[in-house]
Structures are given as C-alpha cells and as structure tokens.
Image: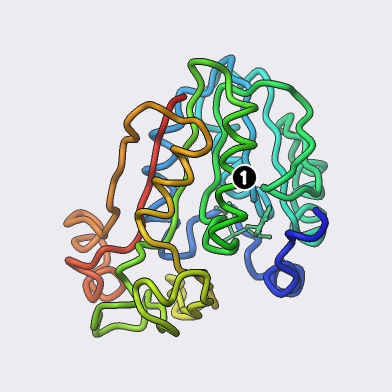
Amino acid sequence: MGAMTDQSSQDMFDDTSKSWARDEPRLLSDWTARPFLLQWSTPVAEKRILDMGCGEGYFTRQLARSSSEKAQHLEGIDISAGMIELAQANEQQIPLEITYSVGCATDFKAQLSEYDLITAVFVYNYTTVEQMQQSMKRVYDHLAPDGHFIFSLPHPVNPFMDSGTDSFHFERSGGWFSGRDQTFEGRMAQRDGSEVSVRCLHKTFQDVLDGLRTAGFTHFPDFRELAVTEKMIAEDEDFFGPLADLPLHMAFKVGK
Ligand SMILES: C[S@@+](CC[C@H](N)C(=O)[O-])C[C@H]1O[C@@H](n2cnc3c(N)ncnc32)[C@H](O)[C@@H]1O
C-alpha cells in the first residue's frame, strides 16, 4: 500500500463498506456495466483470475458463479480492510473458493506470478493518473502472454454534459485538461430509490491509452461506451428512462 494510497478514498470505503454489500443488483451500474463486464470475462473455466479493487466481492462472486466449471484460481484484493472483511465473511458463509486480501492496485503482492484475467471494475476512478499508470504496469507484469486485462471507469465526458439527471452524474471541479487528477464528486441511483456517493478523479482518454502503452501493452484495446439499453428502459422506465442516450461508463479489454 504505502505512500501511493489515497487515504480519503480508503476511509470513504471503510466507512461505507456495509452499504455496498449486496448479492443482487442494486446500483445503476449493476445493470449498466457489470453484466457486460462479466460477459467479457467469461468463460472463467480453468483461468487464473485476479479481481483488483474487488470491494466486498460482488463482481468476484459473479465471476465464481458464472459457470459450472470453476476458475483455477480466483483472488480479490482491495485497499479497504472493511471491504475485505465483508468479502471474507461472505466467503466463509457461502464458500466459492475465492481468496481475498488487503492490497493496493499499484503495488499488490500477487499470490501467483501470472494471471489469465485481471479485472479492475470501477477502481481507477479512485486513483490518480500516476497510480493508474503504475497499476497498469504491474498488471502487465502479472498477465500471462495470452491473458486479458478488463477494466471500467465512469465515462469522463459525463461531468461535462448537462445530463439533466441526478441518477448518475458527477460535478466537475476542473476543466477537461486542467481537471486531471481533480476529484469530481458524484451520485449514483439505486433501484430502491436511494443513492450512493461516487467519486471520480478525472482522467482523459489519453491518460488511459498512455497508461496502457507505457505499461507495455501493444494490442489495440477493445473499447465500449456503456449506456442504458432499450431493454432496460422497457423494464423500468422510471429508473432507466432519464438516462437514455447518456454515456455512463467506459470499458476496456486488452491483451498484451
Ligand atoms: C466502486 S468500488 C468497486 C468495487 C468492485 N470492483 C465492484 O465492482 O463491485 C471501488 C473499490 O476500489 C477500491 N480501491 C480504491 N483504490 C484502490 C487501490 N489503489 N487499490 C485497490 N483497491 C482500491 C475501493 O476500496 C473500493 O472497494
């Protein structure tokens, strides 16, 4: 962990870890992002997987449950001890053969030297550009030659648009370039009508692509801009309707 840890984000997650604990979709991104990321990540059979910034393990458990054939190794790390305690408690109650430990995405001590899949679901919005780039380097070093790295971030244009909705929105506290590394506070709706605080240390597309390139990745990344779908709107117009046509998240899948 050390000096690169963002203490305020760590405290925020230690304090709020209980409100994140869930096994059913609840947050907007449980519909608009995680199912897509899971689809990209599967099949998990026989894979050695590291879920960085796993939180209380919602996505890690989805990976474990995604097929009848198990992953060879499934490991989650998170900087928040509170989140890891919850994840471990869940694993004790309902064992899925996942191992969890406290660790930072920038300098994690991995159990294995190589992974077939490394994921980072909404983690780099809590790190600086430099930390993200350090982490990408570490990912590269621990990725098997034909392995994949999958990560998601809030869509960086979101704070710069007049979205007309609070269901998912960040307040910008800087410009597109001058706001790099500035903390943009935001809100995300939950389907029960409440909302959670979210945070995004602003990064440009160039920051992400530079990070991958300087880490050593030479393959062209698969890139998606995630939004609500017609199907979601048809299912719950009140919840998803106000977000129609807005870019919500971005997802990257890249091989070495
Ligand atoms: C929005 S939550 C996402 C949790 C999980 N990936 C999911 O999708 O359900 C972000 C998580 O990133 C963790 N985090 C933030 N900075 C980190 C870092 N430098 N290293 C590891 N985890 C970090 C937080 O503690 C938090 O659990």
Q: Which residue is the site of mark 1?
A: 135
Left or right: 131, with 112 as reference point: left
Total label count? 1
- The residue that appears at 68% across and 48% down in the rendered structure is 106
Kindly identify the amino acid type of the residue bearing the numbered disc 1: Ser
* Residue 89 x, y percent position in the rendering: 81, 50
In which quarter of the view is residue 166 placed? bottom left
Q: Nearer the viewer, residue 150 or 29?
A: 150
* Residue 164 x, y percent position in the rendering: 24, 85
Q: Nearer the viewer, residue 14 or 129?
A: 129
In which quarter of the view is residue 254 placed? top left
Q: How is the image coloured?
A: rainbow
Considering only vertical position in the picture, is 2 above or below 49? Answer: below
* Residue 237 x, y percent position in the rendering: 22, 70
- The residue that appears at 44% across and 49% down in the rendered structure is 34
Considering only vertical position in the picture, is 217 above or below 93? Answer: above
Badge 1 marks a residue whose secondary structure is: helix
Quadrant location of ligand 1? bottom right
- The residue that appears at 34% across and 73% down in the rendered structure is 176
Disc 1: residue Cβ within 8 A of ligand 1's nearest atom: yes
* Residue 217 x, y percent position in the rendering: 45, 30
Q: Nearer the viewer, residue 114 or 91?
A: 114
The crowd level at tag 1 (other Cα within 10 Å; few <14, some 14-19, many 20+) is: many
- The residue that appears at 50% across and 31% down in the rendered structure is 216
Left or right: 114, with 190 as reference point: right
